[in-house]
Image (cartoon, rainbow, N blue to C red):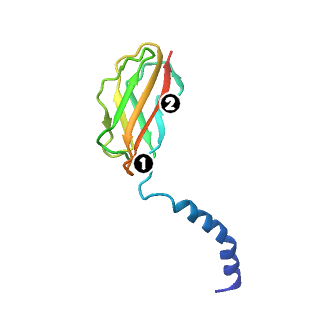
Amino acid sequence: MTLPNVTFIVKALPGLVLISSFALPLPVFAHAIMVKSQPVGDSTVAESPKQIDVWFNDKVGSEYKALAVIDSAGKRVDNKDIGQETFDQSHIYVTVPQLTPGTYTVRYRVVSLDTHIVTGKYKFTLK
Ligand SMILES: [Cu+2]
């Protein structure tokens, strides 16, 4: 091995160690995290959405998934027809009837690949 290559490896070593120390605690299957939604969390929309979509950073279990849309009075308003996209199992959705103006809370519960249950919620407003 020539000297410049050795120098490069030595310089790169701290970075490699850093990457390794971050990588080690990660399980093979990670905890799912919500990464995107439609409507977007905390957004205000002008038209009633037909469907609420939530995406996670990894696919989630097909069983025990839940997605609910709750109005400001605490009443559940979605059609209770939760679905999961076949070719992108990180994506779950539920349809909603025509919504009246107001603020809605979307609640989700899914099982990650690491078997942990992940719950969360966000709001959107229909003006
Ligand atoms: Cu986890």
User: For residue 122, which numbered disc appears in the image?
Assistant: none
| C-beta proximity under 8 Å, tags 2 and 1 | no
Which residue carries the number 1 mark?
A: 58
- Residue 92, position as x, y percentages in the image: 36, 37
First of labels 2, 1 by sequence position: 2
Q: Is residue 54 above or below residue 80?
A: below
Q: Is residue 12 above or below residue 3?
A: above
- Residue 101, position as x, y percentages in the image: 46, 13
Label 2 sits on a secondary structure element that is loop
- Residue 76, position as x, y percentages in the image: 36, 20
- Residue 74, position as x, y percentages in the image: 41, 17
Identify the residue at image location x=38%, y=36%.
109
Label 1 sits on a secondary structure element that is loop
Q: In front of the other: label 2 or label 1?
A: 1
In the rendered view of the protein, which quadrant contains the N terminus?
Answer: bottom right
Which residue carries the number 2 mark?
A: 40
Alpha carbons under labels 2 and 1: distance apart: 19 Å
* Residue nearest the observer in this picture, 110 or 6: 110
Identify the residue at image location x=42%, y=19%.
48
Q: Quadrant of residue 67?
A: top left
Q: Amino acid at mark 1?
A: Asp
Q: Amino acid at mark 2?
A: Val
Identify the residue at image location x=45%, y=16%.
72
Identify the residue at image location x=42%, y=48%.
58
Residue that protrudes farthest toward the bottom in the picture:
1
- Left or right: where does residue 65 sit relative to residue 34? left
